[in-house]
Amino acid sequence: MLYPKAQTKPSKKKNEFTAKIKKVEKDLANGICRKCKSKSIAHYHHITEKGLGGSRGLSIQINCLGLCCECHNHDDSDFSRWADIQLYIRIDSIFADYEDFTLEEISKRLGMTKESIDHQHYKGFLTQENPKSGYYFTKNDIKRWLRG
């Protein structure tokens, strides 16, 4: 599945999901909370929380979870573990066909430009050569990068 492009213009609220990303998440979840699967989506949550890096602040589809009010108001480690698993499942499904990916492939599959990846990842994670595979990155590299 191709995801909508990450927002390129700053929104009024920094790091908010675009209306398109929210709509895709709501449609994918059939309007039901991803966690409890019983209530309507009321909030859109960054899997990697913004305060912890939020996929380095990325408001992209893979980092968006539609949640009800109760599930969104979490503050426990069980929720964090569950959210991490959701992110890893999404990465495994988007990057299922190969083990190694170029920066171009990563940007296309995440719906981002290479420049926005370079800009968002100030630690240079994706601009350094991977000693095992040149300028290719593994699924595990992508998981570590998106998790923060």
Image (cartoon, helix red, strand yellow):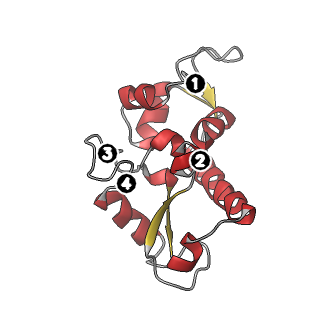
Discs 1/4, front:
4
Q: To which residue does mark 1 refer?
A: 125
Determine whether the residue tagged by mark 1 lies in a helix, strand or loop. Answer: loop
Calculate the distance from the C-alpha at mark 1 to the C-alpha at mark 4: 23 Å
Q: To which residue does mark 2 refer?
A: 91
Q: How crowded is mark 4: few (under 14 residues within 10 Å), some or many (20 or more)?
A: many
Determine whether the residue tagged by mark 4 lies in a helix, strand or loop. Answer: loop
| On screen, residue 64 above or below 26 | above
Going by the numbered disc 3, the residue's amino acid type is Gln
Going by the numbered disc 1, the residue's amino acid type is Phe
Determine which of the numbered discs, if any, sits on residue 93 in the image: none
Q: To which residue does mark 3 refer?
A: 7
Q: Earlier in the sequence, mark 3 or mark 2?
A: 3
Calculate the distance from the C-alpha at mark 3 to the C-alpha at mark 4: 9 Å
Residue 24: x, y in percent?
38, 63
The reply to whether dot 3 and dot 2 touch (C-beta < 8 Å) is: no
